[in-house]
Image: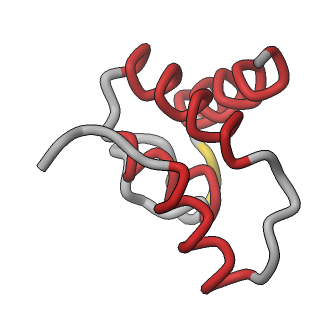
Amino acid sequence: MKNTISKKYIVDYIVKNYGPMRHDASRMVKAIRLTGGYYGISKVDLFHYIIERSGTVPFTTSYGFDTEYGRRVRNNFKNNYDEI
C-alpha cells in the first residue's frame, strides 16, 4: 500500500462520519503530506490522528491526551494548513 492520501479519501471519510466538509480538503491533503513526510508518519494514520485524535501514530497520545510529540505533530500540521 502506498504511503499517501487523496482528497477523495478525506472528503468521503469526513462526509460519511461527520457531515459536510467545513475545511478546505485540498489544503488538508497538502498539509498532511508535508507533515507526514517531515515526521516519517503514514499519511492515512496522520489523517485519523488529526481528525479523531486516534492512537494510530505511535507516541502521540497517552491516556487520550496529546503527548509533547503529539502536540508538535499537530502544530506542524496546523502551521502547514494555514500557510498553504
- The answer to which quarter of the image holds residue 78 is top right
Q: Residue at x 81, y 76 (%)?
A: 20
Q: Nearer the viewer, residue 22 or 38?
A: 22
Q: Nearer the viewer, residue 63 or 58?
A: 58
Q: Position of residue 6 (x, y in %)?
A: 45, 48
Q: Position of residue 1 (x, y in %)?
A: 12, 50
Q: Position of residue 47 (x, y in %)?
A: 51, 51
Q: Is residue 21 left or right of residue 41?
A: right
Q: Is residue 50 left or right of residue 24?
A: left
- The answer to which quarter of the image holds residue 79 is top right
Q: Residue at x 70, y 20 (%)?
A: 80
Q: Residue at x 58, y 64 (%)?
A: 64
Q: Nearer the viewer, residue 54 or 51?
A: 51
Q: Position of residue 34 (x, y in %)?
A: 51, 20
Q: Please determine whether, in this image, residue 32 is positioned above or below residue 63.
A: above
Q: Quadrant of the C terminus?
A: top right
